[in-house]
Image (cartoon, rainbow, N blue to C red):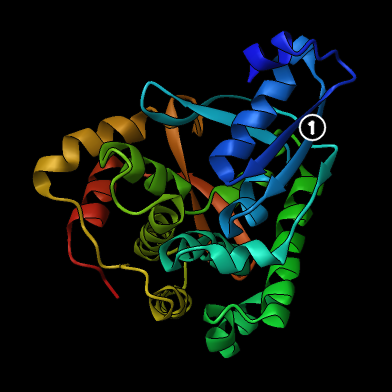
Amino acid sequence: ILSSAMDEGIARDGRIIGFGGGVVCDMAAFAASVYMRGCHLTLVPTTLLCMVDASVGGKAAIDFKGLKNMVGSFYPADEVLISFDTLRTLSDKEFLNGLAEVIKHALLSQDEELYKLLLTKKNEILSRESEALKLLLALSLAVKIWYIEQDPTESLGIRQMLNLGHTFGHALESSSHFALGGHGICVAWGTGRALEAGVALGITDKAYASGATKLFKSYGYDMDYRIGRGDWIDFREHLLKDKKKEAGKVLFVLMEGQGKATLKPLDMQVVQHLVIKKPIF
């Protein structure tokens, strides 16, 4: 991207356009953020995952040395253009990758409107009916934007709550060499582990955690997946390289209740139990 921009003689008032999924939009955004110290940026997300996650919020990052989002910057796009028609072109697996982030947003929302929509309109959502998707996307984006506006550059400990499920999920993605179906699939699984961790520590109400897990399962996510004992060391190594650290300790987003999340470190023995042993619900 940078080489093409230079070859075409694009100046700082030029524009880089990312048209595609999360990888394309992240690469375009990162390139725009560093090209001549920043040029104009337009994002046209074509997947549900990118629409509700990568295209909004200004995080521009790329993977490095096999680890998720290790090199990046904060660089919001000048404009984001969304066409609902592209959602009908996605495979079921790719659609579910994006829907996992939507369900995550439902747990983080300050109200239960998105959660209830997911419960009552499952068939319409999975059938990708236009009106259901428009409402789904609007409510999901509203949740993310609320957190971003409170803490644009993740300096106040508020925006980090959007990382629910990501600490576990990123480690699973990296340790499995990105072979388990995609980012959203791993985030759904990671959110399940975070809910179990919260219950184990007395932070999360078991009924709330069980209900949230059942919601994921109702959309077809494998919440019961466990890594093999022989894979633990590799999983742990990727986990320890996670960028969400404080005083050298990896932090996990745990749920205190609807729309109430907290950052906590977890003992590695607890983590090992959560990712290997049989689910508690």
Residue 231 horizontal side relative to residue 37, left or right: left
Query: Farthest residue toward the right?
Result: 13
Q: Residue at x 26, y 36 (%)?
A: 236
Quarter of the picture holding the N terminus: top right
Residue 253 horizontal side relative to residue 25, left or right: left
Tell me: residue 264, above or below residue 259: above
Give percent across and percent down for residue 32: 73, 23
Camera sees residue 157: no
Give percent across and percent down for residue 202: 42, 64
- The answer to which image quadrant residue 68 occupies is top left
Q: Residue at x 38, y 53 (%)?
A: 186
Q: Nearer the viewer, residue 27 or 147?
A: 27
Residue kind at label 1, given as amino acid type: Leu
- The answer to which image quadrant residue 39 occupies is top right
How many dots with numbers? Answer: 1
Mark 1 neighbour density, 10 Å: few (under 14) some (14–19) many (20 or more):
many
Tell me: residue 133, above or below residue 45: below
Q: Residue at x 37, y 69 (%)?
A: 221
Q: Residue at x 57, y 52 (%)?
A: 262
Quarter of the picture holding the C terminus: bottom left
Residue 51 horizontal side relative to residue 233, left or right: right
**Which element type, helix, strand or loop, lies under badge 1?**
strand
Give percent across and percent down for residue 116: 63, 84
Query: Farthest residue toward the left?
Result: 230
Q: Nearer the viewer, residue 166 or 10?
A: 10
Q: Which residue is mark 1?
A: 41
Give percent across and percent down for residue 71: 54, 22
Camera sees residue 195: yes
